[in-house]
Amino acid sequence: MRNRLSWWYRSARDRLREFERREIRAVRHWLADPEHLLHLSALVFVPLLVGGVTWLANVSPVVSFLVYPPLAAGAYTLFSNPGGRYASPRRFVGGISAGAICGWLVLALTGEYWTAATLGELRVNAGAAALGIFLTGVVTWALSIEEPSAFSSALLVLVTGSEQLTYVGGIIVSSLIVAGVFVLWRRHFYEERARYLFQSTHGDDQVLVPIRGDDPESLVLFAARLAAAHEVGKVVLMQTVSPETIAETESKVEAEVAATTGGVDDEAVTRTAEAQITDRLRRRLERLQELVVSTVDVPCELAVVAEDGSAGRTTSTPPKPRAVI
């Protein structure tokens, strides 16, 4: 009787551990998709940042409630697409601040020379609104800091009444806070997400499979069967990217950006090129991952890394990942 109870206990414990491992793998696999990770980050960080700015507005007269619309829209743009055209902290802070300053200057100009009558509450002179948008567009274009939220901040300053300087100061302070959090998130989490999502890829029971050639299925399945011989075996499919491929993609992206906008941000071009390469290789690796899971039923993770040295050295000592799927 005691032996039977002990067997039931061990069986239940093993099943529970297997269920836990499967759930953790499922969550990691879901987060491994950049779209899922970015949406989750936007849903977590944007509300927290807006809540933090709200608290700051309640305890300090510097931040006005009117900073929320451009700030929330700009923050969502940053976190939902960190490799996009508008994912530059300089563009974000500079664009929103320039919009607020342009709106403030237009309000001062129209109040002094355009109209002598005091407008009612929440009423805005139509000419002032048009001039504010025009001036914001010219300034942000000239300084290469075009930001959609800049036009929102330029219009909202027109309804601030006597708190114009407070609004402009609040925009600058709050945008710096959001940009600082974004830089920390991108540098220490998003770009290093392999460290958090794929910590187990350095264990002794993981089989690293460099993907080369047009027909890697047989090699991948062989590695999967080797991993299946271990209780916690795992396959890591690694696709390397040569510096020449990265440079070629960057040149194409730079040409496209120059043709559409006229201004080129080297940092944004590099991020966009890496995102395009990663997305293209991710689709190939996911097909191999489905083959491994459906045929051998072992955990399978994916990684895209930049080459650093010869192919043989890359196989024995994998380089530090630049982008991980």
Image (cartoon, rainbow, N blue to C red):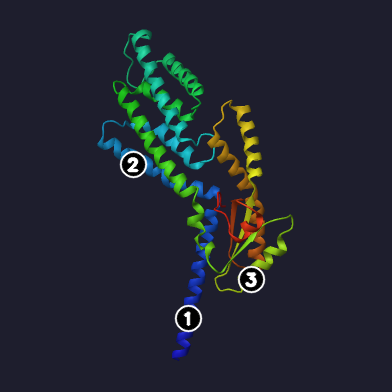
Q: Is the residue 28 above or below the residue 151 in the image?
A: below
The residue under the point 49% across, 51% down is 192
* Marks 3 and 1, the one that precedes in the sequence: 1
In the picture, measured across the screen, residue 48 lies left or right of residue 258, that is left
| Amino acid type, callout 2 | Gly
Number of the front mark, 3 or 1: 3
The kind of residue on which mark 3 rests is Leu
Q: Quadrant of the N terminus?
A: bottom left
Q: Which residue lies furthest to the bottom in this view?
A: 1
Q: Which of marks 1 and 2 is nearer the N terminus?
A: 1
Disc 2 element: helix
* In the displayed structure image, the side of residue 217 where residue 148 appears, left or right: left
What distance separates the C-alpha of mark 3 from that of mark 2? 50 Å
Q: How crowded is mark 2: few (under 14 residues within 10 Å), some or many (20 or more)?
A: some
Q: In this view, does 251 lie to the left or right of 45?
A: right
Q: Give the residue at x 65% y 70%.
A: 225
Q: Nearer the viewer, residue 192 or 140?
A: 192
Q: Nearer the viewer, residue 174 or 119?
A: 174
Considering only vertical position in the picture, is 285 above or below 10?
A: above
Q: What residue type is labelled 1?
A: Arg
Judging by the rendered image, the residue that carries numbered circle 2 is 52
Q: Position of residue 55 (x, y in %)?
A: 30, 40
Residue identified by numbered label 1: 10
Q: In x, y percent, where is residue 252?
A: 65, 35
Which residue is labeled 3 in the image? 226
